[in-house]
Image (spheres, rainbow, N blue to C red):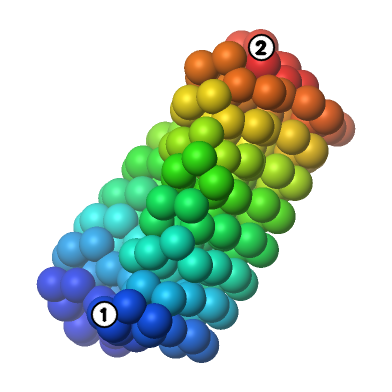
């Protein structure tokens, strides 16, 4: 999408068959370009891998490296914000019930994100969000940041967030997050600089799940609320 382009929504790859795959697709919103609805680098029901969505311009809604509309595997998808603005959410990949989302990444450099960021998100009793990465440098994020997010009783493990430069985080930061009774383990938040207006957690369960071995490492920054390894 070029500097003079404006589109309603963008899909790098889109497949709806039960065993379909979306792999290796890219969408780039150049400086001055505009996308005006939720957009995806890749969308499929069987597997979603190695799709990349880059925002240098403006996205009015949410941006996804990939969406897995099923219980398969989604790996290596990315969203890159390079000086752009995203008014909605950013998700490296979002999977369906009992999906495995692993090794997906969100990078925000010199950008602004108005809502939440998640490196990878899964759901269901057997879902897994593992090894996903969020890296934020010299940026403003107005929403929550999750390295890996479970919306069921599955596992959020070994996800990592790194925050550096003169970044401002206006809401909570979670290396790994489960909003039911899932397992949250081995997640890491690394902070070398920035301003943090709300709490920071290495790992967090909202409904008395299992929270073990999570960590926050701080070498700089300003904190206006508490910091927890796990809660």
Work out whether 212 lies above or below 108. Answer: above
**Picture coordinates of residue 162 (x, y %)?**
71, 46
Can residue 27 be seen here? The reply is no
**Picture coordinates of residue 72 (x, y %)?**
49, 67
**Picture coordinates of residue 80 (x, y %)?**
52, 67
**Picture coordinates of residue 44 (x, y %)?**
36, 76
Marks 1, 2: nearer the viewer: 1
Residue plotted at (51% across, 19% down): 206
Residue plotted at (49% across, 85% down): 23
User: In this image, 117 relative to 85: left or right?
Assistant: right
Q: Which residue is mark 1?
A: 16
Q: Which residue is mark 2?
A: 226
Residue situated furthest left in the rendering: 8
In 3D space, how far apart are the residues under numbered discs 1 and 2 (Cα atoms)? 44 Å
Can residue 87 be seen here? The reply is yes
Work out whether 189 lies above or below 49. Answer: above
Q: Nearer the viewer, residue 167 or 64?
A: 64
Mark earlier in primary sequence (1, 2)? 1
> In which quadrant will I find the N terminus?
bottom left
- For label 1, the SS is loop
Q: Nearer the viewer, residue 223 or 12?
A: 12
């Amino acid at each position: 999408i070029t500097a003079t382009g404006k589109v309603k929504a963008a899909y790098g790859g889109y497949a709806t068959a039960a065993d379909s795959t979306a792999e290796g697709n890219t969408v780039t919103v150049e400086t001055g370009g505009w996308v005006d609805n939720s957009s995806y680098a890749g969308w499929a029901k069987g597997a979603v891998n190695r799709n990349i969505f880059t925002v240098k311009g403006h996205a009015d809604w949410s941006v996804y490296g990939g969406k897995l509309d099923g219980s398969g595997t989604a790996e290596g998808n990315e969203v890159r914000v390079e000086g752009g603005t995203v008014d909605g959410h950013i998700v490296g990949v979002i999977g369906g019930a009992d999906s495995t989302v692993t090794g997906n990444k969100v990078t925000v450099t010199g950008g602004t994100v108005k809502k939440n960021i998640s490196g990878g998100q899964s759901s269901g009793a057997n879902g897994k969000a593992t090894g996903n990465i969020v890296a934020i440098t010299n940026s403003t994020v107005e929403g929550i940041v999750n390295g890996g997010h479970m919306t069921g009783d599955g596992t959020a493990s070994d996800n990592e967030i790194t925050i550096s430069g003169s970044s401002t985080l206006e809401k909570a930061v979670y290396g790994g997050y489960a909003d039911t009774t899932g397992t949250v383990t081995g997640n890491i938040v690394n902070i070398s600089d920035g301003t943090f207006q709300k709490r920071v957690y290495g790992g967090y369960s909202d409904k008395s799940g299992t929270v073990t071995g999570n960590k926050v490492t701080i070498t700089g920054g300003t904190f206006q609320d508490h910091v927890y390894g796990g809660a």
